[in-house]
């Protein structure tokens, strides 16, 4: 499979699914395609898989009962059983609970007959009004600074993070000491923005925000730990539909241990509102 040609709505292709026939009336099944654009190295990006699984769960919940059409996947708890390759995938969705305030659904991402990602979704109603109080008081500019490093296909980060071919991605060099061959605290900051066609659709902007909550490189890179950091478990929250414009991604760790580290990622939209969050437990790369 060759890498997809650039369009103005490449992420829409990830979340636009085709319904499949099923013999189980309780389970929704869908087919999708995750192009090589949405990979880190040779494997599919974790946040993209969560967002695509959320699209499948949302589709089945709405088709099962139209009264739930205004609900959104406000929380996702994901276990990664394997690392999918880009290409065709299937999703199997089962509803666990229907309620006026909260619904629960399970989704499996399947490739070649094997379940590779399992996610438990909590559905509810997103915040839509102005924030009553916000804790993040970041000095991070709302838009990329002139010094920001853009991920391009020929840049060191862009050669690995192919997601940058489907969106604008820049990293803040002031907190990315690893770029200078130095060490620093385990925290990183990025800016992301979907292409115009994706940004014009509120539904896709919400899915993009969920994906962006897993966009930072592993923060132990600032401590000199490089290589693949397998995610043990990740929880993602969607708080509201982001406003059009740049998203800020702030990644931090509470502790980097001998074998494992935690990483929190906060996604803030152009208005300064928190739109998505994630917390994951991951393994430290063996190489250093």
Image (cartoon, helix red, strand yellow):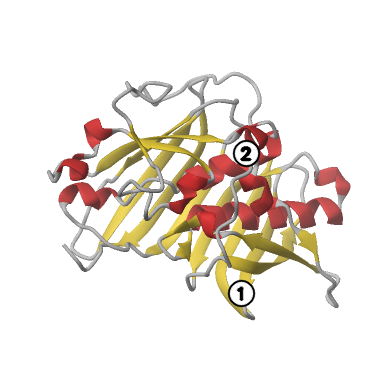
SS state under label 2? helix
Crowding at mark 1 (Cα within 10 Å: few <14, some 14-19, many 20+): some
Residue 227 falls in image quadrant: bottom left
Relative side of 18 to 109, left or right: right
Closer to the chain start, of discs 1 and 2, is 1
Q: In this view, does 99 lie above or below 287?
A: above
Residue at the spot of label 2: 206
Quadrant (top left, top right, bottom left, bottom right) of the C terminus: bottom left
Q: Quadrant of residue 63?
A: bottom right
Question: x, y percentage for residue 148?
Answer: 32, 30
Residue matched to label 1: 111
Instruction: Judge depth for marks 1 and 2 and give the one in front.
Output: 1
Q: Which residue is rendered at x = 63% and y = 58% of the image? A: 53
Q: Residue at x 64, y 21 (%)?
A: 129
Q: Please state the horizontal and vertical placement of residue 147, each as a whole percent of the image.
A: 28, 26
Do we see residue 185 in this rendering? no
- Residue 124 shown left or right of residue 217 in the figure: right
Q: Which mark is residue 271?
A: none
Picture coordinates of residue 137, whole percent (x, y): 36, 22
- Badge 1 element: strand
Residue plotted at (36% across, 65% down):
230
Residue that lies at the very extreme toward the left in this rendered image:
182
Distance from disc 1 to disc 2, alpha carbons, whole Å, reads 25 Å
Q: In which quarter of the image is the N terminus?
A: bottom right
């Amino acid at each position: 499979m060759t890498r997809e040609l650039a369009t103005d709505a490449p992420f829409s292709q990830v979340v636009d699914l085709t319904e499949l026939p099923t013999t189980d009336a309780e389970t929704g099944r869908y087919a999708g395609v995750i192009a090589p654009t949405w990979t880190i190295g040779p494997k599919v990006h974790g946040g993209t898989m969560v967002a695509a699984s959320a699209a499948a769960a949302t589709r089945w919940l709405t088709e099962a009962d139209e009264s739930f059409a205004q609900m959104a996947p406000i929380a996702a708890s994901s276990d990664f059983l394997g690392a999918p390759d880009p290409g065709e995938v299937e999703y199997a969705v089962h509803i666990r609970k229907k309620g006026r305030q909260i619904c629960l659904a399970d989704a499996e991402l399947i490739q070649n007959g094997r379940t590779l990602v399992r996610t438990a979704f909590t559905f509810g109603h997103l915040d839509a009004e102005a924030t009553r109080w916000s804790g993040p008081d970041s000095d991070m500019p709302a838009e990329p600074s002139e010094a920001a490093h853009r991920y391009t296909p020929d840049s060191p980060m862009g050669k690995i993070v192919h997601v940058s071919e489907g969106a604008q991605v820049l990293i803040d060099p002031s907190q990315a000491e690893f770029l200078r061959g130095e060490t620093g605290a385990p925290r990183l900051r990025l800016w992301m923005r979907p292409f115009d066609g994706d940004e014009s659709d509120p539904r896709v902007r919400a899915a993009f925000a969920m994906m962006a909550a897993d966009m930072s490189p592993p923060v132990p890179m600032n401590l000199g730990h490089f290589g693949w950091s397998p995610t043990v478990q990740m929880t993602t929250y969607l708080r509201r539909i982001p406003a059009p414009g740049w998203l800020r991604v702030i990644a931090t760790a509470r502790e980097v241990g001998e074998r494992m580290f935690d990483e929190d990622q906060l996604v803030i939209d152009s208005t300064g509102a928190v739109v998505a969050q994630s917390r994951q437990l991951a393994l430290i790369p063996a190489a250093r």
